[in-house]
């Protein structure tokens, strides 16, 4: 019995040992799971931290790449891009918006690589005021200029657009730099593009990356003020770790962009050249002053140069007179539809006179050069005779061509003014034509209304269009006849005039060998008289005579030019003869055509005013009757004859004339044709006036070149000609155009 108890106790102990072993294994499993969970959690937290870090790096990299693309665009285009307001990739500059998407397509077209993530970035650019609108390209900067009155070197040069001499609209990076400089000193307002720092500050531009999530839950990836504010982004220093915000902002200040574009050294590089140009100008002015002083001592050949300069003025007056007369003749001829016979025929000879005067002008300019050369020889003699005078102190006398230049400028200004007046006249005539066309249309409608007695239609409605067509055909035939008759007279006069001109040239060719020495002797005698004459009026008369003889002598001495002028005159004569024959043929055909047109017009006119009776109104329910033609008229009929005749007279007649034989020239129907003829004449005048402007400008340019660039003079010695302001100015402009010397 005791044995059994002991055995039972042994089995119980073994059973408890097996249970303990099973309990220890469960604890181990739980411990393993706990450790594994900790490892997973630690790995997740590490992964999340690395992911957030990588995301931040990616966002910053995207902003940096986009920022570099904007800088590249501005370097190429000399301005910042406008925002993309409709998200099509292209900038939208028209609305002056300061905020939108970054224009990826525009950046790429300008050669900038904004990166693949560019489409998700918001973009803010400074366009708050005109002076600091960084997306607008305009001539904001120019090199500095020295001020003689207030000795400073701080004011930008005035361009030709503002009354100065510097080239306008040179659009380079310094213009953007100028706007950036204006931005640094601009007074802050909420209208400026800015960030919401404390205090708020303006920006040149700014970029925003929206992050990965809509942290503030407003339906947009962009948080804070970034999606909604018109002119602002959030402070770049706002922490993206804060709840409700994960955007990343990159801003560019005006100062940082100035540094990015090297604005200060860039502008200074050009201003240094500008200062050099001012030095060259000062030296050149000193040189001119020295030349003026030396010229007073050089008197040899000065009288000949002065006389020739006065002759130049006289020849310009003659050329201007002939050119102006030619323009006036063309104007009268055109405005009168070719009926001013003398004016039309005189156009050719006047232009020929202008050509001859132009030849004399060129001859006088060449003569000035010869006289200055003679003065140079006298200057050499002066240097040789006076050892105390260095060659650099002696210059050729500059003939005074100020009067010639003034006359040439006056003629040019008159030509320009005449052209402007003609343009005004053309605009006025076109306005009157529009009014006349309206009046004619209203008169035609009034005729229909009179025939219909104010109702919708009449049986004789279809008689009005043939009348209108016949009236128009008559006006065209009358004009063709008048023009043909005028052409016959004009071309006959031209044939006579050019034949006489050819005869004059033939006489010059036949007598040139004997005429040349006679003219030379006469000119020499005139020179003596001019030198001895003190009365200005008499002296001017002598100079005018000398100018005329000088022009004739020039033609006689230049056989090629003389033959060319004669051949031109022959061509003009033959052309006028051919045109005369054609005009005579046209006139022979125009007469019968005009008669036929008049007969047709009278028929269509009678078909309306002489109708006895007709029906009008809805379904032609009413009867119109002319009691003067029908007796008796039907009961209930309406006498429309007075109203119809009044409407016909208003359309085709004039005061005291009903227009029954032919349309009157002052009628509402003919007035548009008359005004159109006037417009055609004005347009012909414009062509002639434009040619006159061209000739006057060419003449002015020639004299101006003579005034600004007098003939060179060589005096023996070791003098050095300073660098010309024009050459220095060209270098400055070219450097400015190229964007500096960097």
Image: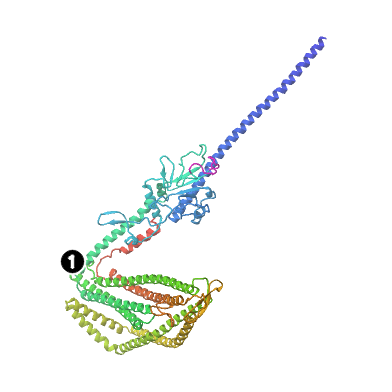
- Observer-nearest residue: 460 or 191? 460
Q: Which residue is mark 1?
A: 388
Tell me which segment is drawn in magenta: 211-225
- Observer-nearest of 587 and 638: 638
Q: The C terminus is located in which quarter?
A: bottom left
Q: Position of residue 409 (x, y in %)?
A: 29, 71
Relative to 629, say whether 213 is above or below. Answer: above
Residue 153 x %, y %: 29, 54
Residue 105 left/right relative to 133:
right
* Residue occupying image coordinates x 21% and y 82%: 524
Q: Position of residue 319 (x, y in %)?
A: 30, 77
Q: Residue at (70%, 25%) from the top-left corner?
A: 25
Estimate how packed mark 1 is, as few (under 14), some (14 to 19) or many (20 or more) residues with alpha carbons within 10 Å: few
Q: Which quadrant is the N terminus positioned in?
A: top right
What secondary structure is found at the residue carrying circle 1? Answer: loop
Q: Is residue 552 above or below residue 190?
A: below
Report the number of discs.
1
User: In the rendered structure, does residue 64 fall within the stretch colored magenta?
Assistant: no
Percent position of residue 728, x then y:
33, 62
Residue 471, can we see it?
Answer: yes
| Residue 390 in sight from this viewpoint | no
Extreme right residue here? 1
């Amino acid at each position: 019995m005791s044995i059994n108890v002991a055995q039972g106790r042994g089995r119980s102990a073994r059973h408890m040992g097996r249970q303990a072993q099973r309990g220890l294994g469960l604890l181990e499993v739980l411990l393993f799971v706990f450790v594994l969970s900790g490892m997973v959690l630690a790995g997740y937290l590490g992964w999340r931290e690395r992911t957030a870090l990588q995301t931040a790096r990616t966002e910053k990299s995207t902003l940096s790449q986009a920022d570099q693309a904007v800088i590249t665009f501005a370097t190429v285009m000399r301005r910042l891009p406008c925002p993309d307001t409709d998200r099509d990739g292209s900038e939208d500059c028209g609305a002056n918006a300061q905020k939108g998407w970054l224009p990826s397509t525009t950046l790429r077209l300008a050669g900038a690589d904004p990166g693949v993530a560019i489409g998700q970035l918001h973009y803010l650019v400074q366009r708050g005021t005109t002076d600091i609108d960084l997306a607008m390209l305009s001539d904001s900067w120019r090199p500095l200029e020295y001020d003689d009155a207030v000795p400073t070197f701080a004011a930008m040069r005035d361009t030709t657009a503002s009354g100065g001499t510097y080239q306008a609209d040179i659009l380079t990076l310094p213009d953007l730099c100028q706007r950036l400089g204006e931005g640094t000193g601009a007074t802050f307002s909420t209208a400026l593009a800015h960030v919401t720092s404390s205090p708020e500050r303006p920006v040149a531009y700014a970029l925003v990356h929206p992050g990965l999530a809509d942290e503030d839950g407003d339906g947009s990836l962009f948080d804070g003020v970034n999606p909604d504010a018109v002119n602002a982004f959030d402070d770049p220093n706002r922490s993206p770790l804060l709840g409700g915000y994960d955007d990343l902002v990159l801003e560019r200040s005006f100062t940082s962009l100035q540094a990015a574009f090297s604005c200060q050294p860039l502008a200074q590089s050009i201003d240094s050249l500008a200062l050099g140009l001012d030095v060259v100008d000062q030296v050149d002015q000193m040189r001119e002053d020295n030349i003026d002083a030396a010229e007073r001592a050089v008197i040899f050949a000065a009288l000949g140069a002065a006389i020739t300069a006065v002759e130049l003025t006289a020849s310009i007056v003659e050329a201007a007179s002939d050119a102006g007369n030619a323009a006036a003749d063309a104007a009268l001829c055109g405005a009168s539809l070719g009926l001013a016979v003398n004016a039309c025929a005189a156009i050719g000879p006047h232009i020929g006179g202008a050509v001859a005067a132009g030849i004399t002008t060129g001859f006088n300019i060449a003569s000035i050069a010869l006289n200055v050369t003679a003065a140079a020889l006298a200057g050499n003699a002066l240097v040789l005779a006076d050892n105390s005078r260095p060659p650099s102190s002696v210059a050729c006398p500059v003939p005074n061509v100020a009067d010639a230049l003034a006359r040439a400028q006056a003629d040019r200004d008159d030509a320009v003014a005449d052209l402007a007046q003609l343009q005004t006249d053309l605009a006025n005539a076109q306005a009157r034509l529009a009014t006349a066309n309206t009046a004619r249309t209203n008169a035609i409608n009034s005729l229909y209304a009179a025939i219909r007695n104010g109702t919708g239609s009449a049986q004789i409605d279809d008689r009005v269009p043939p009348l209108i067509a016949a009236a128009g055909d008559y006006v065209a035939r009358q004009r063709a006849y008048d023009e043909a008759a005028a052409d016959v007279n004009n071309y006959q006069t031209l044939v006579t005039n050019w034949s006489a001109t050819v005869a004059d040239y033939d006489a010059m060719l036949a007598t040139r060998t004997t005429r040349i020495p006679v003219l030379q002797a006469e000119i020499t005698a005139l020179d003596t008289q001019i030198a001895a004459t003190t009365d200005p009026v008499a002296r001017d008369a002598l100079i005018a005579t000398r100018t005329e003889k000088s022009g004739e002598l020039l033609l006689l001495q230049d056989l090629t030019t003389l033959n060319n002028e004669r051949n031109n005159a022959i061509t003009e004569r033959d052309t006028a003869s051919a045109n005369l024959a054609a005009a005579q043929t046209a006139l022979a055909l125009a007469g019968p055509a005009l008669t036929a047109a008049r007969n047709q017009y009278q028929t269509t006119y009678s078909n309306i005013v002489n109708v006895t009776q007709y029906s009008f109104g809805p379904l032609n329910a009413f009867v119109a009757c002319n009691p003067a033609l029908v007796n008796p008229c039907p009961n209930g009929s309406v006498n429309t004859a007075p109203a119809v005749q009044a409407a016909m007279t208003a359309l085709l007649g004039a005061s005291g004339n009903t227009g029954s034989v032919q349309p009157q020239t002052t009628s509402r129907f003919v007035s548009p044709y008359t005004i159109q003829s006037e417009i055609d004449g004005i347009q012909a005048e414009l062509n002639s006036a434009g040619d006159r402007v061209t000739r006057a400008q060419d003449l002015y340019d020639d004299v101006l070149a003579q005034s600004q660039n007098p003939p060179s003079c060589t005096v023996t010695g070791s003098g050095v000609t300073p660098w010309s302001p024009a050459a220095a100015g060209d270098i400055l402009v070219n450097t400015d155009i190229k964007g500096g010397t960097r």
